[in-house]
Amino acid sequence: MSTPHRSPRRLSLAGSALAALLTVVAVGAGDAVARVFPYGPRHRSINDLGNQFVPFHAHLWDLLHGRAEGGLLFNWQSGYGTSFLPDLGTYLASPFAVLVGLFPRADTDLAVYVVTVLKTAAAAAAMTWLLRTQRRGAWWAAGLLGASYALCGWSVIEASYNPMWLDGLIAFPLLCLTGEWALRGRRLAAAPLVVAVCWTANFYTAYMATLGAALVLLVRVALTREGVRTRAAVIGRAAGTTVLGIALAAPVLAPLFLSSGQAYPGWVREFRPVSWADLFARLLPATYSFSSPAVFVGTGTLLLAAALPFHRAVPARTRLAWAGLTAAVALSLQWAPTHLAWHLFATPNGSPYRQTFVLAGIAVIAAWAGLSAGLPGRRALAAGAGLLAAAALWAAASPLVTTWGYVLFCGGLAAAAAAWWALRHRRLALPAAAVLAAVLVGQGAATTAYGHRGKLGGLDDYPSWGRAHTARAAALAGAGGWPAYRTDPGRPALTGNDPMLLGGEGGSYYSSHTPEVFTRTMAALGAGWTSRGRNVQSIDSPVTDAVFSVGARLRPDGTVRRAEVPPLVTTRPPGAPGAYGDSPFANQELLLGARVYEDPVAPGVCRAGTEAYLWAPEYNATARLADGPAFRLNGSAPRNRAAVQPMGVSRGGSSALVFDQAAPARWALSCLDRGRLDTAVAGLRATAASSVTVGSARVRAVLPPGSTGTAVLSVPAIAGWTCNDRPAAAHLGLVAVPLDGRTTVVDCAFRPPGLLPGAAAGALALAVVLGLALARGGRQRT
């Protein structure tokens, strides 16, 4: 099936281009059939795609264009100030991410979609190049298999809304390629750079890809090298380049790992393997589930992999090795110890089969191992088809299978079997190849479209940028006054990261790195959350606005509520501040340093003229004052926590609190006296910093002479802050500096924990890589 009269490199390039083209066509066709953005009226911003990744890419756009508040180390816009380097390394470190800067900011949704498609196409091209590197064979066949890998069910259903996972889809063939270089003793200086790019782009899936690439290399060494010393040398070279590559990525990885340990704990769950019927069902096209492994890679590829054990042209040892590895990895998905090993020894939130792309890649490599040795015979094809048919029959017991899935599977299997057989006849080669490509594109498009149907029907969704976004962004820009005061995008929010998406310097923040100290502080003050505490919402309260220097807050009607607030740095009198208790209203007063709330004059009734605030964190319905509008509280514990809700100005007895559903077991009503609050704010302003200068990761404040007590920065006390050359103290969850009466300047800087050790490790690794390159260059000249 080879074409010896043409350059192998050109043939590999042609195969990679074909794979990328088929991938783009299939994904685009599937999106068009589903009528999702940008091909139809249905948006694709579901779940974390709209809630996290689009806002993060919008913030990256601002960084690239010099419009962001903060820099690479610190983000002033989210969570009242939080570390940004871990978020950068988790969500935005892919080389593809910077392409967002080429689009208008209002087209961030489109930019993320284009990046997603390009990543998928790049994975197809990388796999094709790997296949052609491992063994020579028909370039177009390698392209088909490369495209089938990129169009696997995991890619088009799960990773398509988690764009950073697609970096793992690219990383697996690239890391396998570094294994090939180690096998042949080539490119020892380039290999660590490839590893570094993969681990920097997304360490989580790169870890899985590294495990998979190690397994592939072990099989390659066993099949192609003899002798313990020779094999050990190859494995040593591969291990060395991998360690060097990870060390090169340490300036990003070290802060990221430490930040993960300081994040609010996520959902801890026990792994439960799916039934074998469900697993076999995911071999079929057009199936959907986030809780089972989407292994589908196209029936043409599946047929080759299933036929491999019966392919007589392939040495028995090779057949056993690749078929055995594929089966072993499949079994590892279902066994708890190996499941944990694949996932860094922690069952992930959401999809528990995030390593599925490695199984898909190994199945593709196994298929190529058979095909590159020659076309499978009639018996091998029949046996392989029989295995797939048996799996499909077993899958009938699963609720995941669909009629269309069976139609596409059976039709594709028959067409693929006929096409692979027809390739033996020169006259039928072109039509047969066209049939294989059509089957692949058709099944990939159908699986893509069906995945959209499942995601849009069962997951949270968030609107693409439209008039509401433009109006809110314009209002925030017009009200901005940073760093004199913060501007908060307010509630209800469009996403969990509205400050990054729309602008301002708000309290809401959603990330895998949401600091525990921030979540617990905001919860103590009455904030709501979703995603079990990692998606913290801003608090709609003039008391917390005064504490956090929020001078402008966007209202639900699009107007801006303004207030005179203290600056970012204030002082508190000497004495221990105490500790937070159960009442968010008492906690707000404790942090403010003054009593501003009063108890209801009767159960559920505030004094006329005061503002009623309801705290019912587990309540999941509407509540109202008897003469006022209803407000929705979203308190579905433990996933969601309802925020303190402003109910309006009380008119006395006619404004009694009414729960529209059964009253929750835990709730409290408190009544804000605006006069007291104004007095407290005036007191804070009188003793606050006279000037505040804010840099990308620095705050410098000049205090009145003779200030004593504690200087408090309205910034969460996350690890990494130093003030006046000492580690920062904390005051009720905020950054603080003890004052002795002589301190007139507070100079605080933020550096992500782990940055210096990571930079040192990276520098050392870079020196080693440069030494290897120079040594190799010297040997070549000699």
Image (cartoon, rainbow, N blue to C red):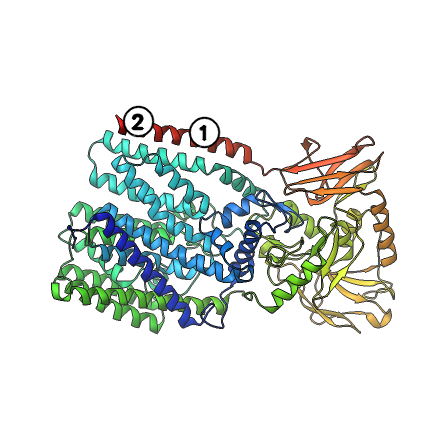
Looking at the rendering, which quadrant does residue 770 occupy? top left
User: Which image quadrant: the N terminus?
Assistant: bottom left
Image: 725 above or below 1: above
Residue that badge 2 annotates: 778
- Residue drawn 35% across the image and 65% down it: 26
Residue 438, x across and y down, in percent: 27, 67
* Nearest-to-viewer mark from 1 and 2: 2
Q: Secondary structure at mark 2?
A: helix
- In the displayed structure, does residue 288 sit left or right of residue 315? right
- Helix, strand or loop status at disc 1: helix
Q: What residue does disc 1 label?
A: 764
Location of residue 343 in the rendering, given as x and y in whole percent from the top left corner: 44, 47
Amino acid carrying mark 1 in the image: Leu
Q: Is residue 634 left or right of residue 370?
A: right
**Quarter in which the C terminus is drawn:** top left
Q: Residues within 10 Å of mark 1 (few under 14, many from 20)?
A: some
Q: Position of residue 773 (x, y in %)?
A: 35, 31
